[in-house]
Amino acid sequence: MRLYLGASTTGNGTPAKGITVLDVDGASFTVVDTVEAPNPMYLALSDDGRTLYSLAETDTGQVMAWRVDGGGLQPLGHTQPAGGSGPCHLSVHPSGRHLLTACYGSGTLAVHPIRSDGSLGAPSDIVQHTGSGPDTKRQQVPHAHMIVTDPAAGPARGHVLAVDLGTDTVYRYHLDQTTGTLRLADELRTPPGAGPRHLVVQDRFGYVANELDSTVTVLDLDAGSPLHTVSTRPPGATATSHPSAIRLSADGRHLYVANRFVDEIAVLAVDGSELTLRTTVPCDGAHPRDMVLTPDGGYLYSANQFDDTITTFQIDQETGIPTRIGTAFQVPSPACMVWAR
């Protein structure tokens, strides 16, 4: 399978050149191409697989489009401002007509129109979050950390979901696809000081990985309310872990959460709204910034930014528990992984 790898070009691991294209077969990795890009810490792919989008996680903040050209990537159109500082996440709206971006530094969201050739226009909307949380070091101001679209349709669903670490809130927006503007529908709160970072959605439930207190909060997206919160650490564990990525197994039975600093992968059993921490597994690397699962659920890959590795795990289909296999693949500062289509 083909994998697009975003990375840090500014430090914490070995500075990367930009975006790397890899072919992956089990625990075997082959570099196909590498293109220069400034701090492409997150990537998103169009539904037709022909256009890759990247952000530049910098103080000024930019987003850019790349044409997928065989095994390589070619710049497509002009780089656009991200609508704020420190952009950290982006996604393509299911309509294919808009790119959505979350900016951590400024606590803003941006909408960019996608032209017919896949290139980006200037922002059609920029939304500024307001508020704060009880953590005086990390929550003095808003910090938008993820923006995705609820895949479910219906009058109470299909919102653009914006996760804000600084305000302990998941904001739900309606996107006007004609004007490319966002209108706030409602706000779903995580526990004070939780610091929500990323989420995944299954059926009526959203599962939110909270960075500051190492937990997952379950949201009822039909009712528009939070339900309960569970830990990503074993009982009695007190070390700071700052969860990053959260992924759902193909069969929907298991959640995987990357716990940084303690460098482990938490495995949680899923039964609708009920989550149970099954185990934690060492990621065998330093600072797991992102994870991906193969579409068939057979393998999990951990991008370990601080020691320049990607580690491979085979997943037991009954228990959901990953087992490390093969040799770690060396690549500078891996931060985000996206499968080709």
Image (cartoon, helix red, strand yellow):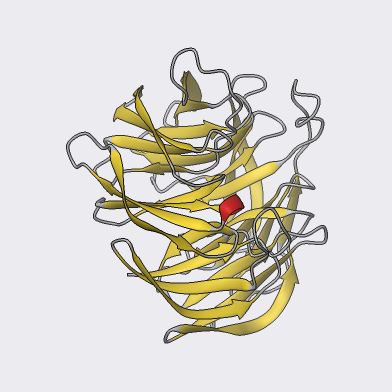
The reply to whether residue 190 is in sight is yes
The image shows residue 151, relative to residue 30, as above or below, that is above
The image shows residue 140, relative to residue 23, as above or below, that is above
The reply to whether residue 341 is in sight is no
Residue furthest left in the image: 318
Where residue 178 sits in the image (x, y, percent)? 59, 64
The image shows residue 9, relative to residue 140, as above or below, that is below
Foreground residue, 117 or 281?
281
Report the side of 281 relative to 286 (left or right).
left
Q: How many marks?
A: 0
Q: Residue at x 43, y 20 (%)?
A: 234
Foreground residue, 246 or 327?
327
Report the side of 266 relative to 170 (left or right).
left
Q: Residue at x 61, y 51 (%)?
A: 306
Q: Residue at x 50, y 23 (%)?
A: 225
Foreground residue, 318 or 142?
318
* Rendered image quadrant of residue 3: bottom left
Report the side of 255 relative to 56 (left or right).
left
Where residue 116 sits in the image (x, y, percent)? 54, 81
**Quadrant the N terminus occupies:** bottom left
Where residue 261 sits in the image (x, y, percent)? 59, 36
**Quadrant the C terminus occupies:** bottom left
